[in-house]
């Protein structure tokens, strides 16, 4: 005869508790695919569309509140590869757009810079509410120490498509048609993720750095490069000597991706970037931004009828 059981108390299990260690064995990266350099390169090149590199490709930064969602697009703003699918979440969920319809028409690959909610929130919403729109997509994300909730999200990514984990042991740069994907060499989650360089020689803004939340200090070799565009690290969070040196500046075009109410970008961050030459500033609170000059079309190919990715501002 079944016996009724009632919950009388719920308490947190400390991570060093033996029960916690047993549970963690069921939530680990051991059941996921770790990629090598060739496999990750192949996945990135899935986003290649013939003749696009000979025209214009560029980095677009979308207004998702207190978070980050960007894409490498063609000259008509159709996404070819997404770099982070984030947005405002938890206490800052009210900074997120009421609706956000993305375009996956020409997108095969999605890169997640690191496992923080404000860089994954849009992915979570799609995987919960419209998983079929992400069918057969390839995801690339770094191996990091994450919570059970992120492991559940990783499992959904893998169930709808193919999740490739960039292992901790794989360091350095992977080059692809759009530029470079870089493994950051810091120790914590922000500073050990992936950073992006977009090289677009036919664009008016030719070289753009997107560090995600990594301090510039932990992005290998960028001190030798002069950039035309920059997405401010960590949404313009507090800035100190540990973030230095700042990227070398050519044209000074900078985007701050943030929402209202969190305090980003800070005065300290703005001043530091301005002192380094990054003075041509646009914030995502004004809308979707494209790293190109105003001689490029603002609408996506569907003219915004099927997505919310039309561009509001260019440089």
Image (cartoon, grey):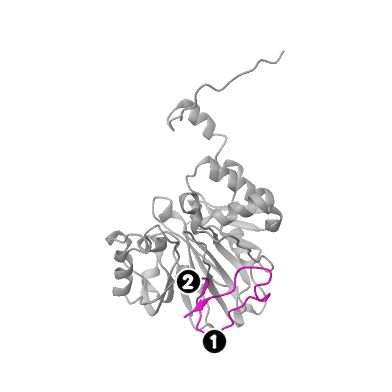
Residue under label 2, please give it.
Answer: 286
Above or below for 28 versus 295: above
Residue 3 is situated, as x and y percent measured from the top left of the image, at 66, 15
Callout 1: few (<14), some (14-19), or many (20+) C-alpha neighbours within 10 Å?
few
Quadrant housing the N terminus: top right
Above or below for 188 versus 274: above
Above or below for 221 versus 146: below
Residue under label 1, please give it.
Answer: 295
Residue 198 is situated, as x and y percent measured from the top left of the image, at 51, 72
Residue 133 is situated, as x and y percent measured from the top left of the image, at 69, 58
Q: Nearer the viewer, residue 46 or 128?
A: 128
Q: Nearer the viewer, residue 225 or 266?
A: 266
At mark 1, the secondary structure is loop
Residue 220 visible in the displayed image: no
Q: Give the Cα separation between the discs numbered 2 and 1.
A: 19 Å
Does 166 appear in magenta?
no
Q: Residue at x 51, y 49 (%)?
A: 143
Callout 2: few (<14), some (14-19), or many (20+) C-alpha neighbours within 10 Å?
few
Q: Find out whether the residues at labels 2 and 1 contact each other: C-beta distance under 8 Å.
A: no
Residue interval drawn in magenta? 287-315
In front: label 2 or label 1: 2
Residue that sits furthest to the top in the current view: 1
Does 309 appear in magenta?
yes
Main SS, magenta region, reads: loop
Q: Residue at x 38, y 60 (%)?
A: 218
């Amino acid at each position: 005869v079944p016996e009724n059981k009632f919950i009388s108390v719920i308490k947190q299990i400390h991570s060093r508790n033996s029960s916690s260690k047993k549970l963690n064995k069921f939530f680990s990266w051991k059941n996921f695919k770790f990629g090598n350099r060739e496999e990750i390169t192949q996945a990135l090149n899935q986003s290649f569309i013939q003749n696009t590199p000979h025209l214009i490709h560029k980095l677009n930064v979308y207004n998702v509140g207190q978070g980050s969602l960007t894409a490498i697009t063609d000259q008509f703003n159709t996404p070819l590869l997404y770099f982070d699918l984030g947005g405002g979440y938890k206490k800052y969920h009210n900074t997120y757009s009421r609706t956000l319809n993305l375009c996956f028409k020409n997108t095969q690959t999605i890169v997640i810079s690191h496992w923080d909610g404000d860089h994954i929130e849009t992915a979570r919403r799609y995987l919960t509410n419209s998983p079929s729109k992400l069918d057969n997509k390839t995801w690339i994300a770094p191996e990091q120490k994450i919570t059970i909730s992120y492991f559940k999200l990783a499992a959904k990514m893998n169930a709808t498509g193919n999740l490739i984990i960039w292992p901790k042991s794989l360091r350095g740069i992977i080059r692809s048609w759009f530029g470079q994907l870089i493994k950051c060499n810091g120790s914590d989650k922000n500073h050990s993720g992936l950073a992006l360089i977009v090289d677009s020689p036919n664009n008016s803004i030719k070289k753009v750095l997107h560090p995600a939340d990594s301090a510039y200090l932990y992005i290998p070799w960028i001190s030798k490069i002069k950039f035309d565009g920059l997405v401010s690290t960590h949404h313009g969070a507090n800035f100190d000597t540990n973030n230095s040196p700042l990227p070398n500046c050519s044209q000074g075009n900078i985007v701050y991706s943030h929402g209202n109410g969190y305090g980003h970008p800070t005065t300290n961050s703005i001043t530091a970037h301005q002192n380094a030459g990054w003075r041509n500033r646009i914030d995502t609170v004004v809308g979707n931004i494209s790293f190109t000059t105003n001689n490029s079309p603002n609408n996506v190919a569907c003219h915004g009828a099927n997505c919310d990715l039309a561009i509001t501002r260019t440089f």
